[in-house]
């Protein structure tokens, strides 16, 4: 049962100015996350989903720049904070778990040191308290023998264990929002299943809202309450998970669902989406999916379509979507 | 008649390279694998990372030397072929790799990459080779004028098409596809899977399709072989996979794959805990027993052989026999 | 750090840029054109290149540029100050200092170039053999290299040059026989990494011969890092040759060579410091120029910094 809204993103734009032109990685994104809710963000590589995640934490590196937008967390607009203030919020209120835990963990520090340091950096507690909390966390993310792991180095752990440690660090300060960017992509399916189960358990235990970024529609179907489908830097469809899978409104979502192989449906021939995802370089103000869209019509040469409601809580950005009013900024 | 037949194939690597490490421990990448592949068939090979499926593929293409066992191709023992005879074999068996970036030499044009096998075997004049390259480009869905471009000018999916064109150049009978779609975008994976399917019927190809993705494997294959720690634990027809798979590991894999249907949420269950053990010293008895929910005393000591349980369905497990 | 972040998060700009010719890391080492484009923006490297070009031209045109015969002794004019006839003055034997410097350019550069070519001729086949063939061949070669690397290079060269006797040719032999080791090791490393690349495996499985694989698929990838290394190394090579000549092992009188000129001028350091200053400046300029160019080439050809030592 999702609770109150903990994070609200309004009209976020992140652009990269390169010698070849402006890369519009995030191009007007709005959504909200509730406590204990999983928002699934799906999209293909280069659709801007990862840059979006970094933008939420103000971690975009030059030549990238957050051009405009608001990220409201706890009544504070993160994007209006100074670097130092942001650093305080990061990890404590909003945390990020990456795809590759090996590169996000410091190879020369023990697991225990890394967790306690995170706690000590934000909380005025004694070292012993921090250590105790770290051990608790390791147990909470489902790692056996926390005392033993405490003194190990990242390379002595398996991929799944490292990802659990990352989750422990991410949750160490009980953040309101946890962003998980492809957290299981580098893992085997049997390990992935364990990690996903852990995430589900943890969101209730920690009362955390989770933004789960993935390219895998299966994971979204299993995990998400709401789904945002991203294409070329924009959310093209947003809605409750059942609506997205059973009543998709955007041609891209429809095509995506037809293009994935499913177990036990061997007779069905896949219908691939023709062409390639577009370059985000100098994106025109037009529907970015138009060149690949089987339903593209005359209207699609016009300006970029905005999200509009097709059902309660279900929004589609398509000129031909059946539906009414344009969505309010901030949705939900 | 089987096109490819592999019996008791073994590949051990010395653990840790170097002068002094030799002969100590070995990684049992492939540890006694037998299967056969009929002409015109696609056999899928699934397993998690480190189970030896890629090594098995490379052994069959003879890029690696097996430690023991035999490989038969068209009833000919190719295990120890070398020199000229091995080069002849190269025309018949080709391979496509996962990483479409590193499998194309960045310094050579597409034309020279696809034409290399033709030049190697002096097939036709230069002009004929060039025409054949253009024809191949069209077959895989690229444009003939792409011949003079360089690999970096293409996207991942297009590069994989170039790899496929090169593999097709010599009219092979068997193509080993080593995770050919795993690094591609979701919307592009289906393009390549369908291309491979069409090429198969068009040219009467056979595939050994290696992947960690059960859904992709069952989509493209007639039969699926499941590998765990260097061994095949089950071979089953694709259409029976979901309903009739018996080996606890296969069942665990099936249960772990997320289903793209929110109504079936919760059907996914974590059947196995932990991660596959180190192939450096695999467990005694059945290799899956430390993670198996059904493991009993016998599993710890005795290694189960592959046994036929139904037509076209073999399983290596003590407790699933009829 | 920036690059790492981009890779990790599937930074979209990276993806876009990758589609542009010449921006993909592999194509950066793969195609010379874009690398030269990048070099064009590097002013220091271009300065280095210009200085080297001038030096080479001076060496070639020495007979036309030198005002006097560099070996002609005019004892009445010894240690003369600069004049119209002798723009930089004369040395202790009354030879024209400028002419000797100009001819010295020719000797010093060509000696270094020949030594470098010899080093390549040894190190490329040896390094490639070690990396490609592997097994006992690799083991044998690497152990020889280890032994050679256990000695300080210059001292070993000194010993060899001493044993062979003085002379420019012997200095080149001495230097090459020590210097190839480092290159062979680097080349072996590159070959080892390229050998495992899928495009090499694909070539093997399409029936390409070992020779074809080495020539078409491996050596082209060895080339650009080796060019970078060689350019960076040219400076120390020139220094080493000058050093051995300074010790009297290299160029023999009356051959004008910068190192030998330094040695010749040494007794007169107090009265005529220019005898040492000018050849010293010449050595410094050319070494600096090669280092600048080398740094620029490294940035242009090897943007990932695999060669940083």
Image (cartoon, rainbow, N blue to C red):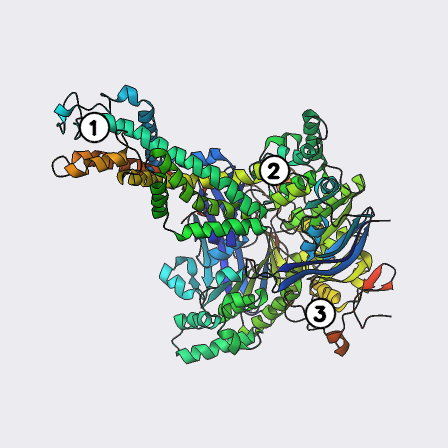
The residue indicated by pointer 3 is B288
Other-residue count near label 2 (Cα within 10 Å), few / some / many at <14 / 14–19 / ≥20: few
Residue C211's label in the rendered image is 2
Q: Nearer the viewer, residue B64 or B193?
A: B64
Residue A102: x and y in percent read 52, 61
The Cα atoms of the two marked residues, 3 and 1, are separated by 84 Å
The residue indicated by pointer 1 is C97
Q: Is residue A92 depicted above or below C26 in this figure?
A: below
- Residue C146 in sight in this render: yes
Q: Chain of mark 3?
A: B
Other-residue count near label 3 (Cα within 10 Å), few / some / many at <14 / 14–19 / ≥20: many
Q: Are marks 3 and 2 on the same chain?
A: no
Mark whose residue sits in front, 3 or 2: 2
Going from N to C along the chain, the mark reached first, 2 or 1, is 1
Residue C158: x and y in percent read 33, 44
Q: Is residue A205 depicted above or below B234 in this figure?
A: below
Judged from the image, the secondary structure of the residue bearing numbered disc 1 is helix
Quarter holding residue A197: bottom right
């Amino acid at each position: 049962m999702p609770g109150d809204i903990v994070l609200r993103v309004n009209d976020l734009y992140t652009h990269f100015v390169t010698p070849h032109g402006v890369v519009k990685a995030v191009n007007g994104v709005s959504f909200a996350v509730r406590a204990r809710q999983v928002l699934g963000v799906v999209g293909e590589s280069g659709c801007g989903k990862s840059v979006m995640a970094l933008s939420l934490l103000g971690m975009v590196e030059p030549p990238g720049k957050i051009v405009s937008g608001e990220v409201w967390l706890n009544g504070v607009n993160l994007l209006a904070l100074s670097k130092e203030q942001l650093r305080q919020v990061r990890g404590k209120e909003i945390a990020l778990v990456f795809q590759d835990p090996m590169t996000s963990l410091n190879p020369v520090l023990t697991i225990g040191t890394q967790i306690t340091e995170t706690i000590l950096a934000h909380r005025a507690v004694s070292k012993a308290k921090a250590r105790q909390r770290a051990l608790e966390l390791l147990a909470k993310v489902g790692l056996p023998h926390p005392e033993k792991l405490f003194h190990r180095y990242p390379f002595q752990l398996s991929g799944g264990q490292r990802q659990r440690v990352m989750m422990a660090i991410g949750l160490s300060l009980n953040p309101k929002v946890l962003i998980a960017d492809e957290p299981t992509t580098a893992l085997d399916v049997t390990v992935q299943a364990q990690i996903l189960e852990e995430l589900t358990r943890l969101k209730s235990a920690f009362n955390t809202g989770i933004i789960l970024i993935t390219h895998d529609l299966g994971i979204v179907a299993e995990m998400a309450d709401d789904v945002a489908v991203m294409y070329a830097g924009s959310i093209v469809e947003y809605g409750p998970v059942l609506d997205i899978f059973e009543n998709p409104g955007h041609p891209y979502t429809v095509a995506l669902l037809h293009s994935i192989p499913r177990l036990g449906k061997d007779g069905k021939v896949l219908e691939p989406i023709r062409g390639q995802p577009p370059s985000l370089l100098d994106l025109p103000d037009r529907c970015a999916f138009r060149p690949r869209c089987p339903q593209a019509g005359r209207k699609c040469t016009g300006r970029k379509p905005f999200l509009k409601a097709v059902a309660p809580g279900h929004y589609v950005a398509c000129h031909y979507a059946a539906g009414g009013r344009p969505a309010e900024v901030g949705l939900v | 008649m089987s096109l490819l037949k592999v019996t008791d194939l073994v590949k051990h690597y010395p653990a840790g390279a170097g002068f002094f490490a030799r002969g100590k421990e070995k990684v049992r990448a492939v540890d006694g694998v037998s299967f056969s592949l009929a002409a015109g068939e696609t056999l899928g090979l699934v397993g998690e990372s480190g189970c030896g499926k890629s090594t098995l593929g490379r052994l069959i293409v003879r890029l690696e030397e097996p430690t023991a066992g035999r490989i038969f191709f068209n009833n000919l023992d190719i295990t120890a072929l070398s020199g000229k005879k091995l080069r002849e074999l190269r025309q018949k068996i080709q391979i496509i790799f996962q990483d479409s970036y590193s499998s194309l030499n960045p310094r050579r044009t597409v034309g020279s990459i696809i034409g290399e096998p033709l030049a190697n075997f002096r097939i036709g004049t230069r002009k004929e080779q060039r025409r054949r390259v253009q024809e191949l480009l069209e077959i895989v869905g690229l444009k003939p004028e792409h011949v003079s471009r360089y690999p970096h000018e293409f996207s991942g999916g297009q590069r994989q098409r170039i790899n496929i064109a090169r593999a097709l150049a010599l009219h092979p009978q068997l193509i080993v596809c080593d995770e050919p779609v795993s690094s591609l975008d979701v919307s592009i994976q289906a393009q390549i899977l369908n291309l491979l399917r069409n090429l198969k019927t068009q040219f009467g190809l056979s595939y050994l399709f290696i992947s960690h993705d059960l859904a992709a494997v069952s989509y493209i294959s007639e039969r699926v072989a499941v590998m765990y720690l260097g061994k095949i634990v089950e071979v089953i027809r694709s259409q029976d996979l979901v309903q009739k798979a018996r080996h606890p590991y296969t069942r665990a894999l099936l249960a772990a794959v997320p289903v793209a249907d929110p109504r079936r949420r919760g059907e996914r269950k974590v059947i196995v805990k932990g991660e596959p053990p180190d192939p450096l010293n695999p467990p005694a008895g059945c290799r899956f027993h430390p993670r198996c929910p059904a493991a009993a005393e016998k599993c710890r000591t005795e290694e189960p052989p592959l046994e036929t349980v139904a037509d076209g369905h073999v399983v290596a497990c003590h407790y699933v026999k009829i | 750090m920036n690059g790492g972040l981009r890779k990790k998060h599937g930074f979209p700009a990276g993806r876009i840029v990758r589609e542009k010719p010449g921006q993909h890391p592999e194509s950066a080492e793969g195609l010379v054109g874009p690398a030269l484009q990048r070099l064009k923006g590097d002013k220091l490297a271009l300065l280095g290149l210009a200085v080297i070009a001038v030096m080479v031209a001076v060496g070639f045109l020495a007979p036309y540029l030198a005002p006097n015969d560099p070996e002609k002794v005019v004892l009445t004019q010894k240690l003369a100050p600069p004049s119209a006839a002798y723009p930089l003055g004369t040395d202790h034997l009354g030879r024209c200092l400028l002419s000797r410097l100009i001819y010295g350019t020719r000797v010093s550069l060509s000696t270094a170039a020949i030594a470098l070519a010899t080093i390549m001729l040894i190190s490329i086949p040896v390094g490639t053999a070690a990396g490609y063939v592997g097994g006992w061949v690799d083991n044998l070669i690497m152990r020889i290299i280890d032994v050679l690397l256990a000695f300080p290079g210059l001292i070993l060269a000194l010993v060899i040059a001493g044993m062979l006797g003085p002379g420019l040719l012997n200095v080149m032999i001495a230097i090459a026989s020590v210097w190839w080791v480092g290159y062979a090791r680097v080349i072996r490393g590159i070959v080892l990494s390229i050998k495992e690349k899928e495009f090499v495996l694909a070539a093997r499985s399409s029936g390409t011969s070992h020779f074809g694989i080495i020539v078409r698929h491996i050596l082209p990838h060895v080339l650009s890092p080796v060019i970078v290394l060689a350019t960076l190394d040219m400076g120390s090579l020139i220094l080493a040759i000058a050093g051995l000549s300074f010790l009297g092992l290299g160029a023999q009188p009356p051959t004008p060579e910068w190192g030998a000129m330094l040695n010749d001028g040494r007794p007169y350091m107090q009265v005529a410091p220019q005898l040492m200053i000018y050849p010293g400046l010449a050595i410094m300029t050319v070494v600096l120029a090669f280092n600048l160019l080398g740094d620029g080439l490294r940035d242009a050809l090897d943007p990932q910094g695999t060669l940083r030592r």
